[in-house]
Amino acid sequence: MSQISIKLRLIIILSLILVTSFVVSSVINYRVSRESIRREVLTSSLPLTSENIYSEIHTDLLKPINVSSLMANDTFLRDWSLAGEHNSELLERYLQRIQNKYGFFAAFFVSNITKNYFYPKGILKQISSDDEHDVWFFDFVKSGQEYALDVDTNEAADNKLTIFINYRLEDTKGNLLGVTGVGLEMNQMTKLLKRYQRKYDRKIYMVDEYGQIQVHINKTLIHTNAPALWQHLGTKVDEVLTPAKIPDNLNLIETVATYCFLSNIYLNLIGFYWLNRTKQVFYPLHVAT
């Protein structure tokens, strides 16, 4: 009995040693593999994908911005305004041509002199600082910016959500004549985001410097701070957007709470941040210290 007992003990001890060795080896391999994947995502996969998405967004937004810039530097528009804004049919045909030629959802000119809002079908309205819907004009003029993007409803098209590119029109002495530009329907931009998300298997949003969502595939979240979104990301607005606004600089963040990676780039072209989030991984990733 004593020999059997000794053999049994040896078998149990050897079994425990083997099991312990296997567990330790598995844990080590797991941690090594996990860190390797983490490093690959942070140093290669995520930056490369982020740069590709950034390049596509930049290209898609460059066209409307360039066209708005051309309108703001068009001698016809400047001369027509300086001549007293007579014969509005000329301006209507001009805006119609811009809209049709480039396929934009909207084309407009708002006079700083008469405060008339012109669009391809005539005069939409006379803007007023007392009208909440017209605050964008006075805020933009006050900002002194050459151009800016503004997400707003389009009163000329059944109040559909639109991304407007507002550009200053000035005379040769720098006096403001008005604001001109084009508009992209939000549906068009959300289709682009959906295409990016399918192509790169990422979640993508655009937010302003305050964390307020400006472009999202879920249009009900636009113009909201969507705290639930930031909670889901496992981070806070300040943690993502606090880094200096270095134009077109990639910033990578590891969100421990949700085990995913988040990158953001400040798009100097439009003054928005775009956020690119990876899918949640199946294991916790800890920030290296």
Image (cartoon, rainbow, N blue to C red):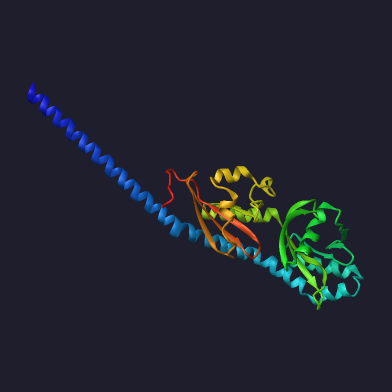
Closest to the observer: 95 or 151?
A: 151
Q: Quadrant of the N terminus?
A: top left
Q: Furthest residue to the top?
A: 1
Residue 199: x and y, percent? 53, 55
Res 20 quadrant in image: top left
Against 263, residue 256 (above or below) is above
User: Would residue 136 be visible to someone looking at this image?
Assistant: yes
Res 14 quadrant in image: top left
Q: Residue at x 70, y 49 (%)?
A: 223
Q: From the viewer's perspective, is 89 left or right of 1?
A: right
Q: How many marks?
A: 0
Against 80, residue 116 (above or below) is above
Residue 185: x and y, percent? 72, 56
Closest to the observer: 279 or 95?
A: 279
Residue 103: x and y, percent? 72, 63
Against 13, residue 1 (above or below) is above
Q: From the viewer's perspective, is 132 left or right of 60?
A: right
Q: From the viewer's perspective, is 88 left or right of 103?
A: right
Closest to the observer: 46 or 210?
A: 210
Residue 195: x and y, percent? 58, 55
User: Would residue 155 be visible to someone looking at this image?
Assistant: no
Q: Residue at x 44, y 55 (%)?
A: 41
Q: Furthest residue to the front?
A: 289
Q: Residue at x 20, y 34 (%)?
A: 15
